[in-house]
């Protein structure tokens, strides 16, 4: 047994691994650095995203037809980054709709998202100076059951004959129900799901689809706020770093696996073995991601008030 | 003429399409057919993992399916439980995706028990063989809590011993001696949502993970299987059918030369032939064929129509 | 006493005390008083101070999770052990608090459900009292909600007592159990399954409409989809693979053209790598978004 005083503090990452923590901090550093650069006036480029350019066109079409715009911020169980991002994009959509006096419908799956959406959309109308146009019932909680929500929203689409629909956020099986229902009435659709399983359904049924990261890029693209643009560039730096690691890892592994080794790490302890071919678990990259550190036993004093728990059946 | 036919072919009315689909999927249910099939590697690995469990092992099962996905998930659930009962495993069930999920799992086990009673087989008893720990809202935080402090996460949860008021689940034989997630030799996830992703994030590497997912989640789950973050998975209705065939025939069983289902990677894994092995997978797999065939035919018709319409326009 | 609480933390740490103990009541009262003071304080706080206050609480809440992730976990911790040094003291404190903090989200979910019910009641009662043309459906909704709540709770109360386990056996059911079963199994589960089944129809119409050879990319999409669809049909795979095997005569190159091999190759090369790539992007986006929210750098709903 090893008393902890003889173990370095860094050893306490044995169970969790230091590499993941290091990478996370690096990504955070990239994001914060680029936010600082953007705030400092640096002009940072974002490529064109067709789905986001279509927002104005979609709302214009809805205004011409005199029909409402429907927005669904996904089926997040809690108010998370995805739901907040979706509502932020819808704030932009609502701003345009408010200017054109176009009615909106925002259907929420989660009550927390509902309260956040209500506050945000009300603030948007107030900031546009048209607080009287805001209808509190335009932001509504439908249901927190997946298919009850799907039935409710589909019903709304068919009854209200929405001209433009925006499905942005976390979607699951009901994504195709929404998309096909809106397609059946000829609505223009802009969609994005953070679930890769649902993206193909949106691609098959919707007019414009934001794939994966484009969803998070949307708010930066639409508002061009320095914080958001800088954050987006920071994400791109992180992706470049991941690409370089993949290339480096592929090359290293390809070279190493051709060779032979006489050392093997078993339960965290290096020991000599008869020469054999290098296995995947012997390579540098594998050791980096899965340290296989030796399990350490630590002596600690026992709490005098501690009472061991009783077993089953007592 | 060509243009008219082309236009018609690429814009068939939806009610006609839907009626054809209803007929194509319902009629085969009345005329069961045996469909030749080779189980995929991921399901073979899934089956091998379950059959390799030592008798009496404790298994943690995250059951996150409900009535909506019962076409696939219920079949997988029933097959998995038949194998676990055979291995005399003890199963701790909890849910994190949907409040309906614990009740749905319970009802499925009760159905299995009623079938076993009819055949005078011992039932899979609540409290002694399985416990229902209940529903945990906020799946991500719940799985994080379970991975870091299982006793704390399940602390205070109660289940029903026979003829007794509810008691702490850790007093059950199922969770006796279990203090952390590593004490389970296997964690199973039967899901139709992204709770499988949370399980990989938090639990992968600490205890072996195996999934039973719906067909639409197969591409995503394949990613985890390929990188060996999970030991195997059963995907969609085909996966259920594969599992039923594996239960019937085993792998390389009785030996590689004569076994119906072979694998170069795996050794001999016994099957246990039983008429009851043929469940939802066997019943519904032919229907899947007809539905997919219809889809392919409609895609071909649509493209033929498009070409004819283009030719008609040119002439 | 009917145990209304579903979960209790073990009575061994700062985060919990023994049931009905004076320490527990003291902590509850202090927390309630502090919570009320904070709530009233927020109501009367100057408008300018609201954003910094919200930013402060956001930062504290997020800091907990960041600390939990970054701080070293205790090595080989056994029940009843005490920490050796300051680093371990913080590690133990964080580990013990995790399940309590997770319980906060569970409690919030319960209250949010109440908020959702309030919203539904507001909208639909308004429709009923104003005689809206769809008021009948609002009545159906509210009656269904009421029935489900009543039967659900009644069944749950029945199961709390000694008869709880006996109610797994249908022979011991009463009116409440039959009612709950009719509403849950008979109606809700079937309606859920029906809505999910509707997707089959939509998939067919979407595939019929979308999979056209309009461009190079659409052709590639159609080809890949067709191969994967065919590989899911066991009968087709079997016939195709048998034909390839008979042509190949053991030639490993030709054996690669079995349908199962081709479909697996599509999954292993294109599909897996694409999904990984998208997931990297989504994950980084979520991390950046979380960072902006935590540090209150995000300005919701502003700008154009």
Image (cartoon, rainbow, N blue to C red):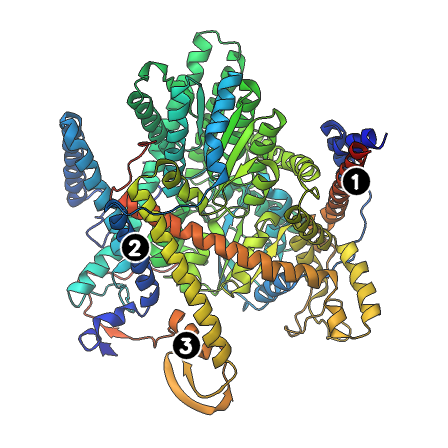
Query: Gap between marks 1 and 3, in whole Å?
Result: 54 Å
Chain to which the residue tagged by mark 1 belongs: B
How crowded pointer 3 is (Cα within 10 Å; few <14, some 14-19, many 20+) is rated as some
The picture places residue B24, in percent across and down from the top left corner, at 78, 39
Tag shown at residue B304: 1
Q: Quadrant of the C terminus of chain C?
A: top left
Do labels 2 and 3 touch, CB within 8 Å? no
Tag shown at residue A284: 3
Question: In this orientation, does residue A313 appear?
Answer: no
Foreground residue among B170 and B29: B29
Chain to which the residue tagged by mark 3 belongs: A
**For the residue labelled by badge 2, is the local secondary structure a helix, a strand or a loop?**
helix
- Tell me the residue at 39%/54% (across/down): A236
Query: Gap between marks 2 and 3, in whole Å?
Result: 25 Å
Left or right: residue A36 compared with residue B181: left
User: What residue did someone put label 2 on?
Assistant: A28
Looking at the rendered image, the disc whose residue lies closer to the viewer, 1 or 3, is 1
Q: Up-down: is A108 above or below A303?
A: above
């Amino acid at each position: 047994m090893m008393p902890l005083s003889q173990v370095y503090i860094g050893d306490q990452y044995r169970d969790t691994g230091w590499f993941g923590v290091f990478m996370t901090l690096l990504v955070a550093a990239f994001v914060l650095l680029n936010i600082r650069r953007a705030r400092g006036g640096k002009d940072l480029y974002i490529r064109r995203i067709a789905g986001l350019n279509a927002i104005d066109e979609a709302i214009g079409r809805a205004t011409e037809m005199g029909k409402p715009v429907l927005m669904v911020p996904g089926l997040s169980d809690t108010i998370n980054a995805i739901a907040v991002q979706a509502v932020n994009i819808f704030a932009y959509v609502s701003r345009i709709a408010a200017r054109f006096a176009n009615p909106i419908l925002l259907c929420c799956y989660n009550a927390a998202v509902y309260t956040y959406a209500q506050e945000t959309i009300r603030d948007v109308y107030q900031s546009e100076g048209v607080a009287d146009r805001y209808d509190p019932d335009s932001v509504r909680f439908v249901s927190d059951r997946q298919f009850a929500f799907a039935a409710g929203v589909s019903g709304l689409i068919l009854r209200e004959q929405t001209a433009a629909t925006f499905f942005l956020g976390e979607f699951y099986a009901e994504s195709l129900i929404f998309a096909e229902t809106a397609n059946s009435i000829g609505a223009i659709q802009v969609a994005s799901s953070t679930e890769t399983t649902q993206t193909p359904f949106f691609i098959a049924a919707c007019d414009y689809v934001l794939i994966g990261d484009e969803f998070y890029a949307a708010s930066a693209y639409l508002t061009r706020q320095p914080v958001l643009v800088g954050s987006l560039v920071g994400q791109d730096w992180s992706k470049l770093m991941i690409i370089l690691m993949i290339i480096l890892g592929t090359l290293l592994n390809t070279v190493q696996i051709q060779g032979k080794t006489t050392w093997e790490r078993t339960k965290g302890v290096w020991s000599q073995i008869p020469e054999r071919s290098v296995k995947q678990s012997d390579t540098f990259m594998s050791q980096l991601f899965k340290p296989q550190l030796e399990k350490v036993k630590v002596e600690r004093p026992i709490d005098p008030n501690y009472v061991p728990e009783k077993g089953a059946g007592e | 003429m060509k243009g008219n036919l082309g236009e018609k072919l690429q814009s068939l009315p939806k009610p006609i399409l839907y009626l054809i689909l209803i007929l194509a999927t319902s009629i085969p249910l009345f005329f069961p057919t045996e469909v030749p099939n080779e189980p995929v590697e991921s399901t073979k690995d899934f089956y091998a993992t379950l059959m390799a469990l030592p008798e009496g092992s404790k298994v943690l099962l995250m059951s996150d399916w409900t009535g909506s996905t019962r076409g696939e998930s219920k079949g997988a659930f029933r097959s998995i439980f038949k194998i676990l009962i055979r291995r005399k495993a003890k199963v701790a069930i909890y849910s994190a995706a949907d409040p309906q999920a614990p009740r749905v799992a319970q009802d499925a086990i009760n159905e299995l028990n009623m079938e076993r009673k009819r055949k005078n087989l011992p039932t899979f008893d609540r409290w002694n063989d399985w416990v229902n720990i209940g529903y945990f809202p906020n799946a991500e935080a719940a799985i994080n809590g379970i991975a870091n402090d299982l006793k704390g996460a399940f602390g205070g949860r109660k289940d029903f011993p026979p003829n007794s008021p509810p008691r702490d689940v850790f007093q059950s034989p199922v969770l006796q001696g279990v203090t952390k997630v590593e004490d389970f030799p296997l964690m199973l996830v039967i899901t139709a949502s992204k709770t499988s992703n949370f399980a990989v994030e938090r639990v992968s590497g600490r205890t072996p993970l195996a999934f039973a997912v719906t067909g639409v989640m197969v591409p995503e789950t394949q990613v985890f299987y390929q990188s060996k973050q999970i030991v195997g998975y059963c995907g969609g209705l085909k996966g259920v059918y594969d599992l039923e065939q594996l239960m019937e025939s085993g792998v390389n069983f009785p030996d590689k030369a004569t076994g119906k289902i072979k694998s170069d990677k795996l050794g001999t894994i016994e099957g246990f032939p039983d008429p009851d092995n043929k469940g939802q997978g066997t019943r519904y797999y032919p229907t899947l064929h007809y539905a997919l065939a219809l889809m392919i035919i409609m895609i071909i018709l649509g493209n033929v129509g498009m070409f004819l319409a283009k030719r008609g326009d040119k002439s | 006493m009917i145990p209304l609480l579903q979960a209790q933390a073990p009575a061994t740490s700062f985060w919990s005390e023994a049931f009905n103990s004076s320490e527990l009541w003291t902590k509850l009262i202090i927390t309630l008083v502090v919570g009320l003071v904070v709530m009233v304080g927020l109501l009367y706080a100057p408008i300018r101070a609201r954003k910094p206050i919200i930013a402060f609480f956001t930062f504290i809440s997020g800091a907990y999770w960041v600390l939990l992730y970054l701080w070293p976990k205790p090595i080989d911790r056994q029940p009843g052990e005490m920490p050796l040094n300051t680093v371990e003291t913080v590690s133990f404190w964080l580990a013990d608090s995790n399940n309590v903090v997770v319980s906060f989200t569970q409690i919030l979910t319960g209250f949010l459900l109440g908020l959702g019910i309030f919203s539904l009641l507001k909208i639909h009662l308004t429709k009923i009292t104003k005689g809206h043309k769809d008021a009948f459906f609002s009545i159906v909704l509210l009656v269904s909600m009421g029935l489900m709540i009543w039967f659900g709770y009644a069944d749950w109360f029945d199961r709390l007592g000694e008869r709880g386990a006996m109610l797994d056996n249908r022979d011991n059911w009463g009116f409440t159990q039959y009612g709950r079963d009719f509403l849950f199994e008979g109606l809700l589960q079937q309606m859920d399954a029906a809505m999910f089944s509707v997707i089959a129809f939509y998939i067919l119409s979407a595939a019929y409409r979308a999979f056209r050879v309009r461009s190079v990319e659409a052709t590639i999409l159609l080809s890949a989809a067709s191969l994967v669809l065919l590989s899911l049909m066991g009968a087709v795979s079997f016939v195709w693979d048998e034909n390839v095997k008979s042509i190949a005569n053991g030639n490993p190159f030709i054996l690669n053209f079995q349908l199962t091999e081709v479909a697996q190759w599509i999954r292993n090369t294109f599909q897996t790598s694409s999904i990984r790539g998208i997931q990297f992007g989504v994950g980084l986006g979520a991390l950046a978004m979380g960072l902006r929210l935590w540090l209150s750098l995000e300005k919701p709903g502003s700008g154009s």
